[in-house]
Image (tube, rainbow, N blue to C red):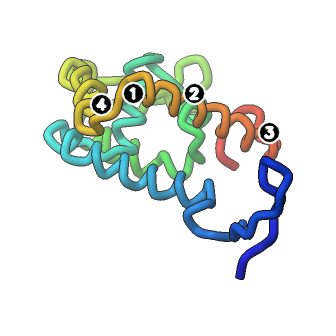
Amino acid sequence: MTTRQTTPDGGLGTEDVLALERQVCFALSVAARNVVAVYRPVLEPLGLTHPQYLVMLALWQHGTLSVKELSGLLHLDPGTLSPLLKRLEAGGLLRRERDPADQRNLALALTDRGRSLREEAERIPAGIVERLDMPLEELTGLHEALTRVIDASRRVLGDADGAAR
């Protein structure tokens, strides 16, 4: 079934507004799944999964963080982070310790091994750009557009601080 819709020139078209290939949610879902799959073989030699890589990126950028701070940066619920953090700790990449400023909170700090892994990881972004074989300008524009989608969806969801609820 098609839905009649006004076209940009004012005429009536017969495009199906529910066509799968026209859905933003479908394109985002497939793109996310595929891009994560492109990262997989690049991250394997470092012993990281994609979600673990995101945790490491945040710690490399910001240094010691509380679980709550990391949760906000990654837009993930603390309960989702917990198993990731345990695996990274078991792998010797980070330490979970009580925050000296507030004993109720856990502080996440990189170990020497976790800090040294950054040097290897610095090659990943260029490798991903090469694997995707897309112009850097196009990927930068896509990142900007996706950031606007994230911001717009957070406004709709009333999630100004960015942490998953």
Badge 1: residue crowd in 10 Å (few <14, some 14–19, many ≥20): some
Q: Is residue 3 above or below residue 24?
A: below
* Nearer to the camera, 162 or 150: 150
In this rendering, the label closer to the viewer, 3 or 1: 3
Residue matched to label 1: 57
Q: Earlier in the sequence, mark 4 or mark 3?
A: 4
Q: Quadrant of residue 11?
A: bottom right
Classify residue 155 as left or right of residue 74.
right
Residue matched to label 3: 155
Q: Earlier in the sequence, mark 1 or mark 2?
A: 1
Residue at the location (63% across, 69% down)?
19
Whether residue 113 appears in this view of the structure is: no
- Kindly check if marks 3 and 1 are in contact, taking CB atoms under 8 A apart as contact: no
Q: Which mark is residue 129?
A: 4
Badge 4: residue crowd in 10 Å (few <14, some 14–19, many ≥20): few
Residue at the location (47% across, 48% down)?
82
Q: Quadrant of the N terminus?
A: bottom right
* Nearer to the camera, 7 or 35: 7
Residue matched to label 2: 144
Classify residue 146 as left or right of residue 117.
right
Label 3 sits on what residue type?
Answer: Arg
- Kindly check if marks 4 and 2 are in contact, taking CB atoms under 8 A apart as contact: no
